[in-house]
Amino acid sequence: MRSLAGRLDLCSVNTATLGYQLPIEQTIDAVAAAGFGAIAPWRRELEGNSIEQVTRRIRDAGLKVSGYCRSTDLTAATQQRFLANIEDNRRAVDQAAALGAACFVLVAGGLPEGSKDLAGARQQLHDGVALLLEHARAQGVSLALEPLHPMYAADRACLNTLEQALDLCAALDPTPSGSLGVAVDVYHVWWDPRLEAQIARAGRERRLLAFHVCDWLVPTRDMLLDRGMMGDGCVDLPRIRSSMEAAGYAGEVEVEIFSQDNWWKQAVSDTLAVCAQRLQEVC
Amino acid sequence: MRSLAGRLDLCSVNTATLGYQLPIEQTIDAVAAAGFGAIAPWRRELEGNSIEQVTRRIRDAGLKVSGYCRSTDLTAATQQRFLANIEDNRRAVDQAAALGAACFVLVAGGLPEGSKDLAGARQQLHDGVALLLEHARAQGVSLALEPLHPMYAADRACLNTLEQALDLCAALDPTPSGSLGVAVDVYHVWWDPRLEAQIARAGRERRLLAFHVCDWLVPTRDMLLDRGMMGDGCVDLPRIRSSMEAAGYAGEVEVEIFSQDNWWKQAVSDTLAVCAQRLQEVC
């Protein structure tokens, strides 16, 4: 496994970690000033901005783009809405291309409102990724399917295990083209008894596009916005990173922390300093 | 699939559903008066009571015991504590035998405090179930491993999927003896892409000992105590029950709802009436 000590160039900051306190230009500069090698911006931060200017700012700051966050829901209650979702995400793929992002992170969407048809939502996800994949290939963008924790199956993502994500990749991109793979986020997958086997499989099938770190706090006080800083929870981060790298992952280690009541209230520079320290010491 | 209309004799009430508002004797009488065929009491309700008297009261009320809840954590930070946990649970197995319970529900326990060693906790679970199984066999009690939702992996159970539970059964009881199986609770497993295949497997391997129903609310406001009444959430209950029964499950359908801010505040008779209605209409 790579040592991260003195190697913040291998590390990335997902801007959600900073609670969107600053405009994107200042966020870019702060991440670069803290020594990180990459950034993962969110679509909401580009609204009202010129994608060319943001891209140039990132380049000028010497940062790579480890990922672009993220798709809106693909699943929908009606076919019309489903097709609108795909179209919306095609535009996001275009932005990912402009940014030169290593991947576009794809979050499935949960059950459409009022639906109990989980198998149907998963079929819709399959169909949606197929449609989006054509466009992504044309744009030279890699789609990273991110399985979300099963506690989000109803309202955020019907894609809930790494195995399920890899099965979907295999169905839609049987000869791995590089255009379809997975984002492995420790928060979502750390509990999975099949995790190590599926990471190894993902490596063999050349699907490892992104690796996100944070920690699982005990207790967790909010199902969405109480993620922990690396080292503050119960996830064996070196073990998972070691599996990723043994499977061939050579991309950035990206910090992504949703923490409404703690880190989002800290000064951006302080949070970045703690991220940098923990990445080097406990990941 | 069996129709439950007019067949509350096929249905059971897990007493946790009623928020422990009444002493066990009154709970037994209320469940019987509402027409249910079975009950699943909790160990805490027997404290300070004679097990023989409670057993007689249940028999006299015409109820079966669909399960006895539940083991305390098997996992522990020290070997001494681990052995104490096993011993404590042997006493609970004795109570399950006295009650004539269809099974003793076994909840694994999560990571010992301060530990990040999930694989180690799972090994400890394996060892603990092996020890407990000897005693259960001698007492004629069936142990039902209950995989809990992955959101409880840290603090409640390192057993998180039906597949993982069945693998453990296969390792410890390779020729199914009836002494080791699983409790399938929709709340914990409804999201699992492998659910139907693993229920079918559980049937083939003769492991289906209990079936618990409630619902997953959207949004869920508390990770432990905000379960929904059947029909109020997004779980396709008939689909899962149909899988269970196609796999050979012929036991009771047991309602188990932890609902601090809703059902636990209702009168016991009202909650029982709604349970009865929903079991017959939406399960």
Image (cartoon, coloured by chain):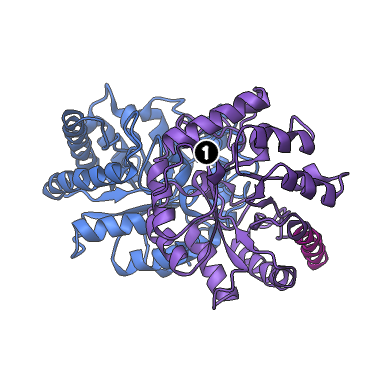
Chain colours: A blue, B purple
Residue A56 image position (x, y, % from top left): 26, 36
For the C terminus of chain A, the image quarter is bottom right
Q: Which stretch appears magenta? A: B78-94
User: Is B93 in the magenta?
Assistant: yes
Count of number-bearing discs: 1
Q: Residue at x 48, y 69 (%)?
A: B205
Q: Residue at x 39, y 40 (%)?
A: B236
Dominant secondary structure of the residues highlighted in magenta in the image: helix
Say which amino acid is labelled 1: Cys
Q: Residue furthest bottom?
A: B175
User: Residue B173 falls in which quadrant of the image?
Assistant: bottom right
Q: Is residue A128 among the parts visible in the rendering?
A: yes
Residue A135 image position (x, y, % from top left): 13, 44
Question: In the image, is B110 to the left or to the right of A239?
Answer: right
Relative to the observer, which residue lies in front, A101 or B215?
Answer: B215
Q: Is residue A2 among the parts visible in the rendering?
A: no
Relative to the observer, which residue lies in front, A164 or B132?
Answer: B132
Residue A272 image position (x, y, % from top left): 52, 39
Residue holding disc 1: B214
User: Is B172 in the magenta?
Assistant: no
* In the image, residue B16 above or below residue A202: above
Q: Give the letter of the chain under mark 1.
A: B
Q: Residue at x 21, y 30 (%)?
A: A78
Residue B267 image position (x, y, % from top left): 67, 23
Please tell me how crowded label 1 is: few (under 14), some (14-19), or many (20+) other residues with Cα within 10 Å.
Answer: many
Relative to the observer, which residue lies in front, B148 or A144?
Answer: B148
Question: In the image, is B248 to the left or to the right of A59?
Answer: right
Provide the secondary structure element on which disc 1 rests: loop
